[in-house]
Amino acid sequence: MPPARSTPFELRPVAGTVVADGCFVATGPQPWLEIRPVAAFRKGAAIEIGYAAGLSDRVTRPILQFRARDGRVWNALMPAPSEGAGFWRGRVPPETVEVRVCPTDVPGPFEFTVESLRILSPREMMRLRVANPRRGLFATGARMVQLRDEADLNLRFVLERAETQNFATWRTRRRRSAVTARATADLVTIVISAAADAASLARSCATLLAQGHARWRMVLSDPSHEALDWARAHDDPRISGASSIEPDSIAEGGFTMCLRAGDRVAPHALDAFLAAFARRPERQIVYSDDARVGPASVTAEPHFKPDWSPTRQAWAPYVGRAALMRADVARPLLERAFPTPQALVDAALAAADSGAVGHVARVLVETADSAEIAPRENRRAAPARAAATKITIIIPTRDKVRLLARCLDTLFAKTRNQNYDVLVIDNGSVEPATLSRLEKYRREQPRFDVAANPMPFNFSALCNFGAARAKGDTLVFLNNDTVVLQPRWLEHMLEFATKPDIGAVGCKLLYPTGRVQHAGVVLGMGGVAGHFGEGLGRRARGWLGGSLAPHEASAVTAACMMVERAKFEAVGGFDAVNLPVDLNDVDLCLRLNARGWRTICDCRVMLAHYQSASRGGNTMRLQKVYRAEREYFVGAWSAAIRNDPFFNPNLSLYDREPRLG
């Protein structure tokens, strides 16, 4: 590995940043620093840049920006330095004359340094290409025929995942120990379930003694005699030797964490948790990522989590016990008997108000177990509104009669819900077989109708045209290349769509092979947005069990999307001006989200999807196709793309499965 450049890098504030008392302070959500000397960034070279941030700062993906003399810019999302440091690999555009970085996305003080920069050797590049041969071959081939944008995109898939997928190795390289303490007098009570041996309790206690935040105390819950004797013999006054915990002993205004003997906390854990509460005082509970070590394992498995996702938690619990809560939340719960600390945290989360739960995307706790919690059947009565809701299914089409017939035949034959109608938007079909089949459906299916609109193809406009003519209170936008597989698909989606705080509802779409094509959209994937989990088996758990259960997502595809008409109209429908074909569904979901309506991908529901069959197949698309739409979308939603709340900033945006970034 070639040596990294040792010359110190200077960071100079250029926008949204001031220096106060020797510390960077963001004055808005986009503080930019110029990185000097720019000559260190060899033009056209593939590089690795190392950087570090404060361990109690908000975890976010920094933005690296290359600027050309003519005003063009190239932005790259860097992995979050959650362990203290991060590394980004990529190519320096040949036109680069200035390099900037945006380290955080919240106002306030922050730490950031550039630690190293090195040129990737030919041997390293060959190794990385071999590790991802398909993308490496595409990158080389595109470069040979002078398709620079396509070459750069495929090269990002080669370079922008961690050099190792071994968590221990990844963590060791990135771990930094320096913590800038934010002065606080908050008392943290650590309640440890200690029905275990003294050695396990000692392991937990050792990590508490190493905390940067010193104002804590440890009390035992249901201790064994061995653990109780150990605690009473310890001479640190912060370690309680009481035989039981009294809820009234939890200090008012303080915080509480519930762990098991053997769990270990990172040295900066309490600092990071308390800093998250200080940034968002309305929070009642803050959880973190964790690592889990099973009884038969010596290696820790990371559990990187999304921001608060109540639907995911209800159906596929993912939070665990790595959480700190305000004492007034913990006190009444401690009066009740919970079998495990995790059960107590689950109860606190179930009772939490909207906006009361926060997330620190750092591995702050290592737990002494690795058991996965399988997605559960969360049987709840459907909202009363759902049963009475009239649904209109809107299907844009143009010829392709075999696709449309397969879609309609399975829809009419399998759909159990009877309170629906189907409106086909005919975008200028001319083939006699198509026109004849449409007329046949109109004669034989009383719930079927056709509305003609022969305009130039504009998916957004066609869907809006259909919505304006729909009879239903709830709309379903459905591609003509889908196949209904389950009788209760509409019922399941309605359970969510009719809730007052939910906007768009999507489902799991399968390729004809049975592999997953869509289980929710992740923003930033591939640089813009993409289908995380693509390629999984239809019964695979997926990331945190989400491929088997309903869960929050930033967006879902309009190949099958349900939304109440009133909500759809409130945001103005699809954007037919700026996004006529591409990214219009993601944009719609984000506008609904911005109004407070969450997006749900209900993976209980599965449809087959012959992706893009009606638009000529699924072949690789040149980057110039829909370039204007991508540029508009990135400009409109740059903040959301930077940090998808339902993904995790430690994971690569250039892989369809959870890979370290």
Image (cartoon, helix red, strand yellow):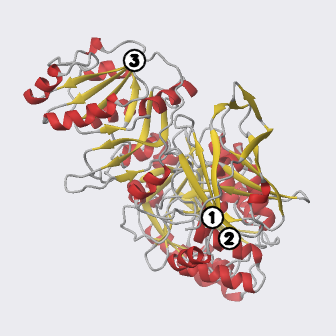
Crowding near the residue tagged with mark 2, few <14, some 14–19, many ≥20 C-alpha atoms within 10 Å: some
Position above or below: 618 against 235: below
Question: Residue 333's x, y, as percent?
Answer: 29, 23
Binning the other alpha carbons within 10 Å of mark 1 as few (below 14), some (14 to 19) or many (20 upward) gives some
The type of residue carrying mark 3 is Leu
Could you tell which of marks 3 and 1 lies nearer the N-terminus? 3
Residue at 54% in and 59% down: 652
Task: Tell me what residue is drawn at x 42 percent, y 36 percent.
Answer: 287
Classify 2 as above or below 14. Answer: below
Q: Secondary structure at mark 1?
A: helix
Q: Are marks 1 and 2 in contact (CB under 8 Å)?
A: yes
Residue 389 got which mark?
Answer: none
Left or right: residue 477 compared with residue 193: right
Tell me if I can see residue 24 in this picture: yes
Mark 3 or mark 1, whichever is nearer to me: 3
User: What residue is at 25 percent from the left and 45 percent from the top?
Assistant: 368
Q: Quadrant of residue 168?
A: bottom left
Measured in 3D between alpha carbons, the distance from the residue under mark 3 to the one under mark 1, in whole angstroms, is 43 Å
Give the image location of residue 55, x and y in percent. 52, 37
Does residue 575 show up? no
For the point 31% across and 51% down, the residue is 376
Q: What amino acid is found at the position of numbered circle 1 in the picture?
A: Gly
Residue 366 spot, x, y in % from top left: 33, 43
Residue 424 vs residue 277, the one in the foreground: 277
Mark 1 to mark 2: distance in Å? 8 Å
Residue at image mark 3: 187
Identity of the amino acid at label 2? Leu
Which residue is disc 1 drawn over? 526
Residue 535 in the figure: left or right of residue 138: left
The residue most toward the left is: 225
Residue position for label 2: 153
Q: Secondary structure at mark 2?
A: helix
